[in-house]
Amino acid sequence: MENQQTHLRVDNVTEMTTFDYSNENLPRDFDIRIEVAEQREILEQS
């Protein structure tokens, strides 16, 4: 009986994507709702 060895090679290739942090395409009320939610979260923690 032959002893067979198999090697599995996995290449983890991830593409770097640039994330656009600009919110100028979002409506202004969306930005305000985010601010209110963040303030509410901070108040609930204290």
Image (cartoon, rainbow, N blue to C red):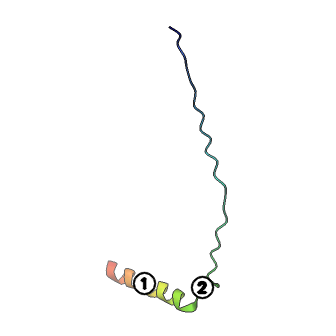
Question: On the image, numbered disc 1 is attached to which residue?
Answer: 37
Tell me, yes or no, if residue 8 can be seen here.
yes
Q: Which three-letter amino acid code belongs to the residue tagged 2?
A: Leu
Q: Tell me what residue is drawn at x 38 percent, y 85 percent.
A: 40
| Residues at marks 2 and 1 touching, judged by CB atoms closer than 8 Å | no
Image x and y of residue 46, in percent: 32, 80
Q: Which three-letter amino acid code belongs to the residue tagged 1?
A: Ala
Which picture quadrant has residue 38? bottom left
Image x and y of residue 25, in percent: 64, 84
Q: Tell me what residue is drawn at x 64 percent, y 68 percent.
A: 19
Left or right, 16 with respect to 2, comes to right
Left or right, 3 with respect to 17, comes to left
Question: Disc 2 or 1, which lies upstream in sequence?
Answer: 2
Q: Is residue 32 above or below residue 19?
A: below
Question: On the image, numbered disc 2 is attached to which residue?
Answer: 26
Mark 2 or 1, which is nearer the eye? 2
Secondary structure under tag 2 reads: loop
Q: Residues within 10 Å of mark 1 (few under 14, many from 20)?
A: few
Left or right, 7 with respect to 34, comes to right
Q: Is residue 10 above or below residue 29?
A: above
Could you say which disc has been placed on residue 17 in the image? none
Image x and y of residue 18, in percent: 67, 65
Q: CA distance from mark 2 to mark 1?
A: 16 Å
Left or right, 2 with respect to 41, comes to right
